[in-house]
Amino acid sequence: MSRFILAVFLFLSLSVAAQNSEEPGNSAKKQWFLSSTVGMQMSGIKAEDFISSNYTQAFSLSAGVWFTNELALQLSYKGFYFNTISDEVKHHYNFIYGELVFNLNEMLNGSAIWDKNWSLLIHPGAGIFYNKHYDSPNICANMGLMVSYKITANFDLLFDASGIFGYDIYQGDDDILPSLGLGLKYNL
């Protein structure tokens, strides 16, 4: 299943890049950006996970580049720790991953649903998750939906709903660390 999803995303990104390069008046320059969000996360989405001791802060930092108006690539970091309902230990971790970023507004031909200051972005990716409590690395996926609002020419306000998906992050089976974050993006 994961190979199928990866193939679909690669196909979409290549299609968007090819479509953009064929249009004579549409030569988007590469635009670099840095972004950071802070917020909250919880370990799991099962009914028993919705207790106050299961919530912790979330932090992310990203650097990326827009190749076209529709497609960007970014390298990201998430951390620092999460709590579980099974123990009182802070499970410190580092998650470094790469992502494709799809601007749905631009993919829908600059849809009039949003004005030009708003963007709806989907950002799937994968990387190395290192749980310091386990003392071992793990390959995990990250999937998110982000809303971006342009404040000035260089700064965007971000709201990100995302999650880290993997096997044996902390429970010995399929795990998820969902998070909500608010932050800023600086366009270089």
Image (cartoon, rainbow, N blue to C red):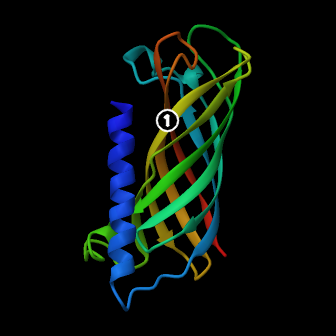
Q: Pick whichever, 159 or 22, lies toward us.
A: 22
Residue 161 position, x and y percent, is 46, 46
The answer to which image quadrant residue 69 occupies is: bottom left
Task: Report the side of 169 relative to 14 (left or right).
Answer: right
Task: Report the side of 146 relative to 40 (left or right).
Answer: left
* Residue at 52% across, 9% down: 172
Task: Look at label 1 and name its amino acid.
Answer: Ala
Would you say residue 81 is visible in this rendering? yes
Task: Assign the C terminus to one quadrant of the image.
Answer: bottom right
Kind of element beneath mark 1: strand
Residue pointed to by mark 1: 141
Residue 160 position, x and y percent, is 49, 51
In the rendered image of this protein, does residue 69 appear above or below residue 139?
below
Residue 171 position, x and y percent, is 53, 11
Task: Assign the N terminus to one quadrant of the image.
Answer: top left
In the rendered image of this protein, does residue 127 appear above or below residue 181?
above
* Residue at 34% across, 40% down: 5
Would you say residue 178 is visible in this rendering? no
Q: Pick whichever, 40 or 173, lies toward us.
A: 173
In the rendered image of this protein, does residue 140 appear above or below residue 102?
above
Residue 76 position, x and y percent, is 63, 49
Label 1 crowd (10 A; few <14 / some 14-19 / many >=20) = many
* Residue at 58% across, 15% down: 170
Tell which residue pokes out farthest to the bottom in this image.
25
Disc tally is 1
Task: Report the side of 183 relative to 163 (left or right).
Answer: right
